[in-house]
Image (spheres, coloured by chain):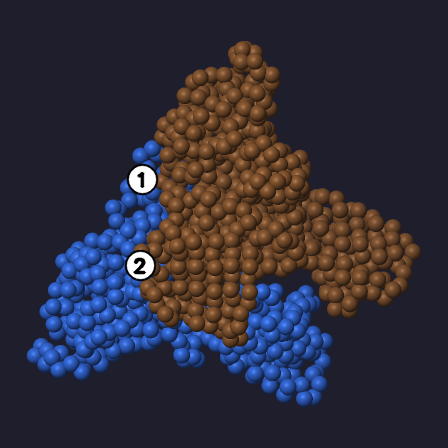
Chain colours: A brown, B blue
Amino acid sequence: MPLPAKAELGQGRLTVDRRCVISLDASAEPRVRKAAIRFCELLSRQTGMPIQPSFATGAERAFLQIQYGAPGEQVQSVKANESYTLEVTDAGARLKAAEPLGVLRGLETLLQLVQMDAGGTAIPAVRIDDRPRFPWRGLLIDAARHWMPVEVILRNLDAMAAVKLNVLHWHLSDDQGFRVECRTFPNLHGMGSDGSYYTREQIREVLAYARDLGIRVMPEFDMPGHTTAWFVGHPELASGPGPYQIERKWGIFDPAMDPAREAVYEFLDRFVAEMAALFDDEYFHIGGDEVNGKQWNANPAIQAFKREKGMKNNHDLQAYFNQRLLKIVQKHGKKMIGWDEILHPTLPKDSVIHSWRGQKSLAQASGQGYLGILSSGYYLDHMLPTSQHYAVDPLGKECADLSEEQKARIMGGEACMWAEFVTPETIDSRIWPRMAAIAERFWSPANVVDVEDMYRRLDAASIRLGRLVTHRSNLPPMLERLADGSETEPLETLLSVLEPLKYYDRPDAREYTSFTPLNRAVDAARPESLTARRFANLVASVLTDASAADAAQARRLLSLWRDNHALLKPVIARAPMLKEVEGHSENLAALAEIGLEALDCVVSKRSPAPGWPARAKTVIERARKPQAELLNMLAAPVQKLAAAAR
Amino acid sequence: MPLPAKAELGQGRLTVDRRCVISLDASAEPRVRKAAIRFCELLSRQTGMPIQPSFATGAERAFLQIQYGAPGEQVQSVKANESYTLEVTDAGARLKAAEPLGVLRGLETLLQLVQMDAGGTAIPAVRIDDRPRFPWRGLLIDAARHWMPVEVILRNLDAMAAVKLNVLHWHLSDDQGFRVECRTFPNLHGMGSDGSYYTREQIREVLAYARDLGIRVMPEFDMPGHTTAWFVGHPELASGPGPYQIERKWGIFDPAMDPAREAVYEFLDRFVAEMAALFDDEYFHIGGDEVNGKQWNANPAIQAFKREKGMKNNHDLQAYFNQRLLKIVQKHGKKMIGWDEILHPTLPKDSVIHSWRGQKSLAQASGQGYLGILSSGYYLDHMLPTSQHYAVDPLGKECADLSEEQKARIMGGEACMWAEFVTPETIDSRIWPRMAAIAERFWSPANVVDVEDMYRRLDAASIRLGRLVTHRSNLPPMLERLADGSETEPLETLLSVLEPLKYYDRPDAREYTSFTPLNRAVDAARPESLTARRFANLVASVLTDASAADAAQARRLLSLWRDNHALLKPVIARAPMLKEVEGHSENLAALAEIGLEALDCVVSKRSPAPGWPARAKTVIERARKPQAELLNMLAAPVQKLAAAAR
């Protein structure tokens, strides 16, 4: 995962042993050599075998031959060639690419081909011809709303590389924090970050690390809104009177830069100069979203400025700001990218529209000649099932009707990990494994759409990614904390069928600030219950052909859930943080009992007792209600069973 | 854990919230300030709350007041004062220490006091007056036999600090590898390490990291034996003709330095000069163990040298080498320490004897006026139960009869993690949590010996340590690899009652080299089965008072084990690496069935069916046999049950 564009299985297999002779031209770029060493390290970790790389040039009997045509770009761009071919026979593996980037991608594929079975550790003979569908395949990590230390970024880069993503969109400033050391204006990070910011050295470390993995790092400094944290140290940039405090709540806030003051542009010129030199990517993301205009409306000088310039509305005012900012960004050698809101008739055609609104907005931009990428449908913080993201195509919906030329302007997409409800402890579990399926959407051919097959491969991908990121390993410590010393199994059983509230229902459920601990059951629960998904499939299968094995498996699961409350109840009694899920635990038992009775009726083709349907309805309705910001995902499949039993 | 010397619970509790105001003198040492920040970070990780430290001086209402008397030593020594007092009331916590080290120790205690319960997150009111029993409390990590990257060392330092250990004994060279960059003789690491060695910069990083945690780092360069890896690049040091290869097997090997050649001492003088400058600890460990003398006996020049000097045996020859080495070590400002073998009438009294042989050897050394530390009984690679290590006391056995003055020369102990059978993936699971109990032996008063209480506290300590090291988190990925995509639960159930072979039975069971993958069931299994331990306690309790609750719990466990094979069998069929544990899985089911029958007989006070005792005996005997280098730890308690049933 992602599935290659073309793969043909051959005959035989290549044995993997501890001596990994790699044939590589002596003049190969350092990052290619590093990638080969990294390949061996990852192979060691994957297999548990101590694998030692050794290099040779033109070795006939090399385990792996690496060749590429042209040197890579000084700074990786959206034009880089990532294609490769990989041929594995029982004599060796041959990896050929046009550029170093293709080598990196091919090595990740090779890692995924390794099998450990009765014949030992080996790679099946195969011929793969692979290239990405889109040149822009990104993940946005918001390090502003909750601080994410460097190690969070580094490990996520590792995982991104594993699924062939190539852009880290680093959201570095927002109302809740300004996260980069700024030499020119040290009050930006000094007063706007609570001391939690990336030093210049750390930024360089991340860029170098990402480059070695073939990942571009694009910074975002959101302007002119989402800028409260800037104003703590620089109130003179704001459209309203200060003083300002770092924002602790979530939402859209009033503070915005003053587009009418020349000093603001002088400030931004010096700011962008420093940041453009620090970040080497060709693109500079200026945000540009969600300005509510209240500060502008309340400021007489700004109103006068609008009248004077003949601007009809705040959108015009923001367009003016964007044009000024664009000139600054261009002056410092960058191309500008921003969210949908920056689209305006006056915007130059070499800007990129980053759409959080959807394909319609993207199609419109592309139709007008702009480049574009899609993020709508890929919001990981919405806690949606993988299948839902997987179904979203950057060239789907309105974009499907574009001309080929217009389609070519849609460069790909980015998944967004907005950080209102994640901490370093939980963020990986919100990104992974779902991100892997989105990465496949961006890389693999458009016709790779088999959802069941995707889920099957996602299971394996999740285990593999678990060696790089913490989406699996963070769960036991969180369960241990919640259970406060009691055994965690019954809690794990309960949480395995619950999911956090979707979209923006969570902030609506309770008053949250950036200080609120994210250590509750809702934070430990996974965004998608694969257990509930499997059970729903089982129910569907029982209802269509009622195979005895499926029915037995469904019965086994329902019995486990029915009995779980008796085990969890004493744990809850000793662990106060679990009090809030007691209702869920009771409901699960009751729901499972309904499910068992319904299953029996279906399997033995008998009718339920009179009064049972009413009771079933009550139980299912109760289970459906969110509690502790968690949803019981078994309510729907049990309802299906119950309906069939009637 | 370790239990403080003295603790008195008070009334009330101190609430922990996100604002952690710490009162600290402005002139405090940087490492004390760093420790306070680290305290907040660990508290965040522990509670899941975002905790922000802020410093104040003399703040009346500080959450935590830190005071200490004298500045710390430039380089931490065995004389450092680690005592502290900690007073927690509902108004705040006051931590007082003589030196910075005591502050570090007290902060670790404070972390352990934090409770999350119905009343929120808080620390109970308490007064603690604490000091260590021994000044030398160490862990030896062997980075020679299997390479351990820096991150392994760093994370283990974190865990060591959590249980108040203060010496990392870093075993840096052996037959299988020379692991330090040496500027003076670059062939040492260049040819003796397969490229896996610590750079000088990394060594400095480790020393600085350890110093901040109040941990001394003592290097060991084992001489004159265990030196094959030196000879790969420097055969001229050896007593036998070269060339030499890095040793790939385990055991005691012939190669040894030539004590009769002056050039050897000239080499060592320059070598020790560089290493003594790099490592700042006052002690320099020269190993000195296990010279089999074969190369010496085979070398006519060495034999002539012995005759000439009037030496009676090889022990005299080694003593001569040690004296020469001692002078070199002293010349470069260090004190010498070595294993038992260095003890010899000619050895100067300021040397330290490090005993792997036992208290008898230690008592003898102390009786002769030497300082000593104990490692016998603390070999973590022997895979023994925690209780067995816990029962070993540096002042026990022969040492108990020493005079007070002699006892005072016994400075403490070190647990040893020899690395024949560990990799970076598994090493933490062999060190932790057992090390925590040994750390308590070294720190807490001699009368802290309640084994059941130790195990109860060890459970909590293990969870806490799981946030620092990987002894818990490494298991799921290993199980996933073994199960090759199938569900891992039944395998986990089986492994939870198996233990690896003890002492040196494992290398006897199979031919191992340093290239052998350590990725099998025996590597995933924990050194001590706490499940089997709990079951044995349950059986003991059933047999003494046959409480219905205990019997029901025993029945539940036995039923789980009886049914596990049916679940694991299909997994094994699909996962070839598990084939070797199929016999264990079958035996577990059979054993559990015997256990269930025996339990029924005991509880209902009836006799088993005729023929049953014979069958029980057969099943238990079969289960007792090691398979796949693993032992079934339920055989013993089931046998007890069966015996009682007869």
Labels 2, 1: one chain: no
- A464 shown above or below B638: above
Chain under callout 2: A
Q: Residue furthest left?
A: B308
Chain under callout 1: B
Seen from the viewer's position, the closer of residues B468 and A13 is A13
**Residue for point 30% across, 67% down:** B177
Q: Residue furthest right?
A: A610
Mark 2 or mark 1, whichever is nearer to me: 2
Q: Position of residue B257 (x, y in %)?
A: 19, 72
Picture quadrant of residue A383: top right
Q: Position of residue B15 (x, y in %)?
A: 53, 38
**Residue for point 51% across, 73% down:** A12
Horizontal arrangement in the rendering, residue B340 relative to residue A8 (left or right): left
Residue designated by label 2: A26
Task: Specify the amino acid type for callout 2.
Answer: Ala
Residue designated by label 1: B29
Task: Specify the amino acid type for callout 1.
Answer: Glu
Horizontal arrangement in the rendering, residue B250 relative to residue A245 (left or right): left
**Residue for point 26% across, 46% down:** B73
**Residue for point 38% across, 31% down:** A274
Q: Position of residue B284 (x, y in %)?
A: 23, 60
Quadrant containing the C terminus of chain B is bottom right
- Whether residue B242 is visible, yes or no, is yes
- Residue A496 image label: none
Give me the C-alpha separation between circle 2 and circle 1. Answer: 50 Å
